[in-house]
Image (spheres, rainbow, N blue to C red):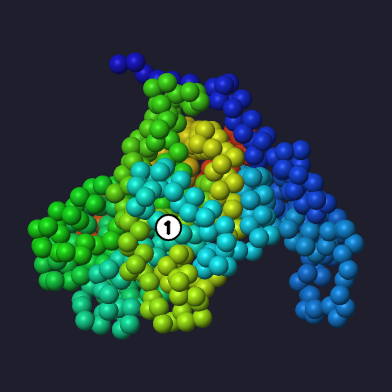
Amino acid sequence: MNSVDPDQAHSLHRDFEEKFERVKRLYFSRDPRHWPCFADAGFRDVSSFRALHLAPHLRLGAYSDGESLARKLQAETDIPEQSRPPDGCPNSMLRFAAAMSKDWENPSSAENVITMPCDPAIYGAMLGTLANANLVYEEYAGMASELEKVVVRQIANLAGYDPDRASGFFTQGGTFCNLYGYLAGIRKSLPEAKHHGMGYTHDYRIINSQGGHYSNITNLSLLGVDIRKRAIRIKISNNNNIDLQDLERQLRACFDVGSVVPAIMLTMGTTDTFAVDPVKAVHDLRNRLCLQYGIDVKPHIHVDSAIGWTMLFFLGYDFDENPLQINGATLAGLRRNVEMFRELRYADSFTVDFQKWGYAPYTSSLVMFADRSDLKFLENDPENFSYFEDELQGHSHLQATIECSRGAAGVFAAYAALNFLGIEGYQVVLAHCLQNADYFRHRLRQLGFAKVIAPENAGPSVGFRLYNPDGVSDAEAEFAVEQHRQPDKEYLERLSANSAFHRQVFLDRGKVGLYTNWVSFIAHTSYDETGRCHRLPGEKAVFLNPATTRRQIDEFIHHILGPNPGQHLHGAGPAA
């Protein structure tokens, strides 16, 4: 069997780099020659300052009169008595606040699932803001509501939904999308909850995964669910995706005692390690058990794909021909992910955050439903909408949405991004990010004292744990010891020492090369007989930023290596 040189597998192809540089130049440059809105004096000044890509601790001092402006901003309390006529000059405080906001254009910015929006999406959002449409009510939206329907059809087609049967609407962030997923299941399975609240007549349990986003729990609290007694959190695998065996056990336990399961919340692309739940397997399990137990109203399967949805752009990619010349390491992982994301069409609903890996500004989020009839379950009583024209009700999502105001800026931003970048443009920028993530994993593995968490997930999020090289010569072996949960004191002290070492290294390093984040739950130990595990902390870098290059990655790795990688906590690791 021929072995593949790891360095060669991660090398960048010249053709790909040329395609990426074109995408970056046309859609991420803030260039007024392509996008005249950036010729505005205020936009130009803010973009020029942010283009300096200064380290966070240098930015305030580098801004003209920055210290004084910061003090003024922090002390300001009064609205001016007199009007100020426009003079064609940017407002100094607005310009300062914008320039000094978090610099997501900085190539080092890789802390979380946030990134710079693309130029066409910014332009689209500006047009949407100018129009000021309210999408809740067709009369207040005009043609903006038709633009929303276009984006819904485009995403339905992309995901494999029937665009004539599917529906969806834009809302305020991924948390609201997931809230609607839960709510659809509750209204279908527990229709009396609309008027009487949760648990009025039926015993119920709502299911989600231990690896899901925190909104999986905060949304349940918002809905009035007794989280301790009515929510079931399913175990996760070593790759942080849902444990199907535990899910089946828990579903059977509910159905055995007649407990209703309104909703199952899955994730395709978790925030910290890009774990992808197997949607079709859960869909088939649900259907099989509902048939076996005679359950007519099936649990609603909602998928939080806020980050991962953009993998749908590769469903039609020719992996054999590889026209973009994506490198071998990334191509293999991307092919695996694409096969999993083909299953998104088995979800009853799913979340799309354009503001994350779709490169639109905040907020631009879409909740999609496979069957538009599910929206009928979300509708509230028509008598509550007496000040709207009866004949216009039903032509928008007025009665089905929580919001009384849904702005259209996110729709305009999403449409502009989709229709200027197109599928190939998205493929290029996404592949650039994934090649960066794979290269970072490769460099971490070379250290010997770094454990990459769930590398098989092959997404943009890279989680890892660093060990003291004075005490750990094999990170993989040490992590295997950590994963095998033990009840003795020595084991717990070992976990604590390893975590303390990495935490101190992270704090001492600061912002060098890549700006990363500390995560309190990046991995976990095995489960004991009661279903408990220890959460293992670690560090993560998320490669959504099109400005990030291998230069920042190499600088980060070089700093970790240093003259003595264990200098921060010499000897703090476990005994050799």
Q: Is residue 157 left or right of residue 435?
A: left
Q: Secondary structure at mark 1?
A: strand
Does the image show residue 258?
yes
Question: Is disc 1 surrounded by few (<14), some (14 to 19) or many (20+) residues within 10 Å?
Answer: many
Q: Is residue 563 left or right of residue 10?
A: right
Question: What's the residue at 38%, 32% (across, down)?
Answer: 335
Quadrant (top left, top right, bottom left, bottom right) of the C terminus: top left
The picture quadrant where one finds residue 197 is: bottom left
Q: Position of residue 462 (x, y in %)?
A: 47, 44
Nearer-the-camera pick, 517 or 432: 432
Question: What's the residue at 50%, 25% (across, down)?
Answer: 324
Nearer-the-camera pick, 6 or 170: 170
Does the image show residue 269?
no
Q: Position of residue 111 (x, y in %)?
A: 56, 51
- Give the residue number, with chain letter if any, for mark 1: 168
The picture quadrant where one finds residue 531 is: bottom left
The picture quadrant where one finds residue 528 is: bottom left
